[in-house]
Amino acid sequence: MFLNNDYTLLTGILLFVLRYCLFAGIAFFVFYVWKKKEYIHLKLNQKQPVIRQIKSELLYSATTLLIYSVSVLLLIYWYQMGYTTIYSKIETYGYGYFFLSILMMVVLHDAYFYWSHKLMHQLPFLFRFHKIHHFSHNPNPWSAFSFHPIEAIISLGIIPIIIFIIPVHPYALFVFSTFMTLYNVYIHLGYKLNFLFLGSLTQNTAENHDLHHRVSKYNYGLYFSFWDRIMKTYK
């Protein structure tokens, strides 16, 4: 699973870029090109995002993907030095734990995302970076990774937390990161399509996050809404 350092950067770039372009590209093509007129009644903001916004999002997304790709080198280094709890054989903990670890990563990430996101809104020196993401007043799939480089680095903070605390298999990390990318594209879709598998009282939706881009003091969560409900920032 862990490649030689000579190929790690290239592999990381291909993995992150192709996955993001696949998810965001298909979503954008379906809802903003192919079926734009058919689904317009579900559009949360009836205006279409302007070309200037999309160009900016593509530029910042490319920077984010580059940072994410380079970070793989650091993960490999920590693994090779024996600093992480990453294990190589699924049988070490079994398949039950394999799937449980994915759920644990999602729950941990949701907590990390909520509090880091909220801090970026409350602390002026952090909001100067986060406001780049809020330039996307009309969210669309390309808004998902449109971060200032500093915010991109902050968003990566969940990875050390995971690999230093939870025994985790590389394939579980891959599934988690794929789900994270897909869900990030979904909540930035800009359409009222609530794919609820946990119910409206628990799950964060595209509609919730679209409101956050318009009224930034509400709905800081990523996957779930319970942190927003506990902290009374849900709307």
Image: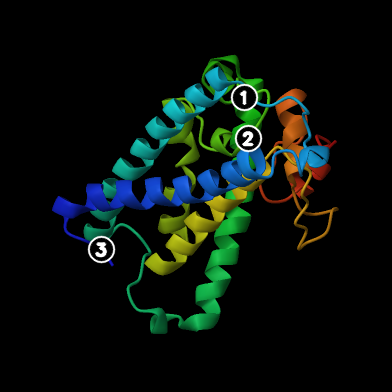
Q: Quadrant of residue 4?
A: bottom left
Q: Which residue does the image show at 34% across and 37% down from the upper left? A: 66
Q: Considering only vertical position in the picture, is 11 above or below 62?
A: below
Neighbour tally class for label 2: few under 14, some 14-19, many 20 plus, Cα within 10 Å: many
Neighbour tally class for label 3: few under 14, some 14-19, many 20 plus, Cα within 10 Å: few
**Foreground of the two, 219 or 167:** 219
Q: In the picture, which quadrant includes the C terminus?
A: top right
Asked if the residue at tag 1 contacts the one at tag 2, i.e. Cβ–Cβ closer than 8 Å, the answer is yes
Mark sitting earlier along the chain (3/2): 3
Q: Secondary structure at mark 1?
A: loop
x then y, percent, for residue 136: 62, 24
What's the coloring here? rainbow
Mark 1 is on which residue type? Ser
Q: CA distance from mark 2 to mark 1?
A: 8 Å
Q: Secondary structure at mark 3?
A: loop
Task: Note whether residue 190 is visible.
Answer: yes
Asked if the residue at tag 2 contacts the one at tag 3, i.e. Cβ–Cβ closer than 8 Å, the answer is no
Neighbour tally class for label 1: few under 14, some 14-19, many 20 plus, Cα within 10 Å: many
Nearer to us: label 2 or label 1: 2
Residue wearing tag 2? 140
Q: Considering only vertical position in the picture, is 116 above or below 112?
A: above
Mark sitting earlier along the chain (1/3): 3
Q: Quadrant of residue 202?
A: bottom right
Mark 2 is on which residue type? Asn
**Foreground of the two, 50 or 7:** 50
Q: Considering only vertical position in the picture, is 93 above or below 112?
A: below
Q: Is residue 214 left or right of residue 175?
A: right
Residue wearing tag 3? 2
